[in-house]
Image (cartoon, coloured by chain):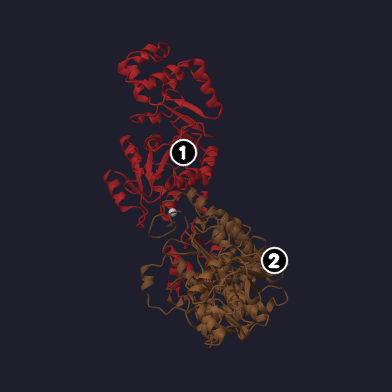
Amino acid sequence: MPMTVKELYWYWLASTPGIGIASIFRVAQMGFSLEELFTQPRLIENNTLHFSEQIKHDLKSRANISLLLEEVDKIERAGICIRTAISPGYPQRLKDLWRPPAIIYTYGKLQNFPPKCIGIVGSRYTSRKGAAAARELASTLAEQGITIVSGMARGIDTQGHWGALEVGAQTIAVLGCGADIIYPKENAELYAQICENGMIVSEYAPGIKPNPRHFPLRNRIIAGLCQGVVLGEAGLRSGAIITINYACDTNRDIFVLNKGDGGGNQETIHKLNAMGATEVCDAHEILQYYGWEIKQNTVKQQKEKPSIPVGLDFFQTELYNLLLKGDFSMQQIIDLLGKSASEVSMALTMLELKGLIEKLPGNMFGIKG
Amino acid sequence: MLASVWSGGLSGLQGYPVHIEVDCSSGLPYWEIVGLPDAAVKESKERVRSAMRNSGFSYPSGRIIVNMAPADMRKEGPIYDLAIAVGVLKVSGQVEGGAWQQALFFGELSLNGDVRPINGILPMVIDAKERGAESVFLPAENAQEASYIEGMQVIPVKNLAQVAKILKGEEQPVCVDQIAFQTLKLSGGNADFRYIKGQSQAKRAMEIAVAGNHNILMIGAPGSGKTMLARAIPSIMPELSFEEALDITKIHSVAGELRGAPIVAHRPFRSPHHSASSAALIGGGSKAKPGEVSLAHGGVLFLDELPEFRRETLEALRQPLEDGFVSVARVNAKVEYPARFMLAASMNPCPCGYFGDPERKCRCTPYQISRYLARVSSPLLDRIDLHLEVSRPSYEELGKETEEESSLQIKQRVDAARDLQRERYRKEGIYTNSQLKGELLERYCHLQPAAEALLKSAFELMKLSARAYTRILMVARTIADLSGEVEISEAHLAEAIQYRTLDRKYWGG
Ligand SMILES: [Zn+2]
């Protein structure tokens, strides 16, 4: 849908670095329209607007319709959709935020914001258990038609997105840089898949580089887009806690993932409980919480935990049973089972080839899944 | 008047005889050395003159011409001082050389007449022996180096005056006792696997590596004992034969690395720092000396912190790894030094070192990790058959009171596996499984259908890279040899697959 003139004025203001929704409200409070501000540059000088010299200069130099149209055209030709806070495509939920973004840029196959969204956030540095738990939760929710929203950061964010993509579902990533920039670099494949199956969202103009100051602000958009936010594994000082605080301020439901196996950060769980978070041990509890219908027989359930493996010899069975208790290093397995390095190596390869176990960093081995 | 003296020279590791003629005639004082002398040889004039005067001899006035033959070989280093001094003493009639006409003289002179040690004694004395020489005058500090060359009378000397007395028959030469090689071997020892607690998989990997003469790469956090494991490798390598020991000693003698030892009786363990230059590692430089790869000949070259080595240095390793020798260019010739060694290398799993560590958190990004791993060039990785992940032993493991297997016990299995390989490859011109390629690989690493199927599914499931294929076959062949079996079974393959960590995609993924 082509931009209206009103939207264009809004774009002119909102895309100027240093101007947020608060500045735009101030213009409205002054009693004149954006059009008047645009056509009468002397109004920009008004002291009650508190514009810095730089902003004044930027605004004046871009107060030109054909120049703006050219800018917009260039962005849209790159496939990026501009949504100002007054555009029909702007997600209503974001307006619950205390300071919603005045403009967002979106990119990817998904055109509209889905009704059921759940955010998944957590630490960038995760244990294998924490990562697996987040991924599984995301998969199950996604299979039930819920869109997973996260920040494409390392760790839990990445797991959340992949969990959704793995079951063929859409997912939304909110970035702290321009929607055309891949950050962190190693998530290039993830970025491509999200574009193909979901949506990239950013309040920063295309081309803007990631900046540490952007990430806390990005987190408020994640909270804003969702009905509820799930905290996966995270320490109390993790950036994910910022998202939780935003979620709290915006009256979003907060869930904390606690599988009850001692995994996860107990300190964080206690703190969040005190904030009124709901402890959940799987996706179904979240679905029940909202009263969302649960569809049965989904892909993921069919490839559930391997049943009692067949065709294993005595030692392989013994080894498999040991790994069911947890992850162990090569040396621990050798010591606990009293076998030689050679015998253990062979058995591990055999179990791995049967798809029952997997090799983990640090020469550790664990049950696959 | 003319006097002649014998000495020797070095071309690479090969000694050759040098015949020195000293001519003295009346005239204005004049001194000239001809026969391609280098600067150090030319300077011997000053040392010879001072040494003679300070030892109570008179230095002849007049024209002295020293001719060194063969004239087309460059004479290098201060090793001819003693021989030239003896020539001057003879030509000026201050000593009679009659009984010692065929003896060889080696040594640098200090200004006060002391005879100082030189490098490269061993190959030169061996060459002299092969040409029928029976006695050699050597700096006392080098005497041990030549002590086990059978049938050679080795006369250690301390200073020029002593040499003169022996030549004049005023003093009886005290020859060095012949030392039996076997007794040398017993003295001094390597690290022993008995003293390394736990690390069962690492020890097993070392056993396989040595049994098949495979290169090995250890990956583990700092403090996981990678260096200790590497140091113990020579203790399970096959016994050195006398011939091998001589070859190794020649190299060390030429490089001046013997440090007073008579012979290298144990397999060398060389561990150059990662700041080492290509010349230091491969050999060459202004003196065309053997590098670390040659000093490690017959033993282990340990490259700690492999990714820290300069890229061109690692690239330069490929040629000796491929050919077993290096060619070093020198002024007017090229010399070859042997460089057949087992490569043991170590690296951290990531820049901070703690990727996968159960106790310390790694803060490296996957991008940083993949860049770090990429620093090890893939052509070098292609020459490394085993990858071994070494984890830090826990405190409980260190405190355990278990009896660990000694190096000797491991070595017996290694020896048996080596015997099998030597027998099998007798007609093929190779000795160990690590040398298998092409047609030989197909012939000797033939797989039964079941084993073939296992390997195929391993490639699909574990996403192994293509280069892993031949490496797994070769290592599986060695594992089969260690258990004395003719056919490579599924079990052997299954074990071998565990040693291809770096080919798997889980790293940082
Ligand atoms: Zn690290």
Judged from the image, the quadrant occupied by ligand 1 is: bottom left
Whether residue A163 can be seen here = yes
Give the SS element for disc 1. Answer: strand
Which residue shows up at 63% across the image and 58% down it? Answer: B466
- Give the residue type at disc 2: Asp
Q: Contact (CB < 8 A) between labels 2 and 1?
A: no
Q: Position of residue A327 (x, y in %)?
A: 43, 62
Task: Check disc 1 and report the residue beneath it.
Answer: A173
- Mark 2 surroundings: few (<14), some (14-19) or many (≥20) residues within 10 A: few
- How far apart are the alpha carbons under marks 2 and 1? 77 Å
- Give the residue type at disc 1: Ala
Of A207 and B77, the residue lying toward us: B77
Q: Which of the chains bears the disc numbered 2?
A: B
- Mark 1 surroundings: few (<14), some (14-19) or many (≥20) residues within 10 A: many
Q: In the rendered image, what is the letter of the chain coloured red?
A: A
Task: Check disc 2 and report the residue beneath it.
Answer: B72
> In the picture provided, is A332 more to the left or to the right than B73?
left
Specify whether disc 2 shares its chain with disc 1. no
